[in-house]
Amino acid sequence: MSHMINVDNVTKRYERGGEVLTVLDNLCLTVDQGDFVSLMGPSGSGKTTILNCVGGIDTVDAGTITVNGEDVTTMPQRRLPDWRAQNIGFVFQSFNLVPVLTAMENVILPLQLTPLSRKERKAQAIFALEIVGLADRMGHRPSQLSGGQEQRVAIARAIATDPAVILADEPTGDLDRENANAIMELLQRLNTELGKTIVVVTHDHVAAEMTKRILHLDKGVLERTEVMGTAAAGASAGAASGTAAS
């Protein structure tokens, strides 16, 4: 099985108040094609920074990140928006929907960066909303939807361009347990039925246990990997070598 994401000796630093903070410290990890991984760790452990670097939103100070065989760290800035539109679907805790747009219009937004015709974009958006179970809500604005429905619209928007990778940052953080479980079950379906490679940042242990592997981070370093449903006895050794166990 090939690596969809390869983070190789990545270091990321920020300067705050004259102090340099190392958020990622020679981090190495891999995510295989078709994997479903959660990143856990205390605040400041670098979880969201990893997502931003993998998605080409943030740059690294050292090391390389390849996604679907392409080196994101050396990609020209002008190419990144098109590359993201074709390869990455983002899901955020706060949904990030445009309030004045309908569910359909929100899902169509990332499709504007594709060469699809207007008719094709609409068909693709309808298909994405059908997948997340909201075909009957496509004319509703975010204020007319529940939190769980808003997150489903956000997921439909993330998968509308048929990306290889879905990056979800605390996708259940603003939801109650029932809706959180429903969103994770939807992500499971996207993984098993559509073969999407999914990386989820979460503080929610219940949500994390619905993924295939949990990568535990602290201070920008991968500490251990927990494989769901099987003994994770060898995971610490994998983490020690710097690469997540497959």
Image: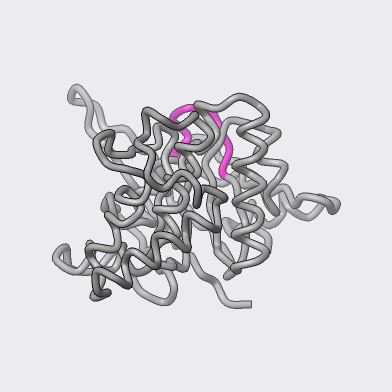
Q: Nearer the viewer, residue 146 or 27?
A: 146
**From where the camera sits, is residue 72 visible?**
no
Query: Which residue range is magenta in the image?
Result: 39-46
Residue 64 lies within the magenta run: no
Q: Quick check: 21 above or below 110?
A: above
Q: Identify which residue is drawn at 32% across, 72% down.
A: 120
Q: Residue at x 45, y 37 (%)?
A: 150
Quarter of the picture containing the C terminus is bottom right
Quadrant in which residue 195 is drawn:
bottom right
Q: Nearer the viewer, residue 46 or 237?
A: 46
Left of 118 or right of it: where is 1? right
Side of 184 where 101 appears, left or right:
left
| Percent of width and height locating residue 80 | 23, 64
Residue at the limit of the structure toward the left, as seen here? 78
Question: Residue 148: where, in percent of width, then height?
Answer: 53, 34
Residue 175 spot, x, y in % from top left: 55, 27
* Residue under the point 47% across and 54% down: 129
Task: Identify which residue, 77 or 16, lies in the foreground.
Answer: 77
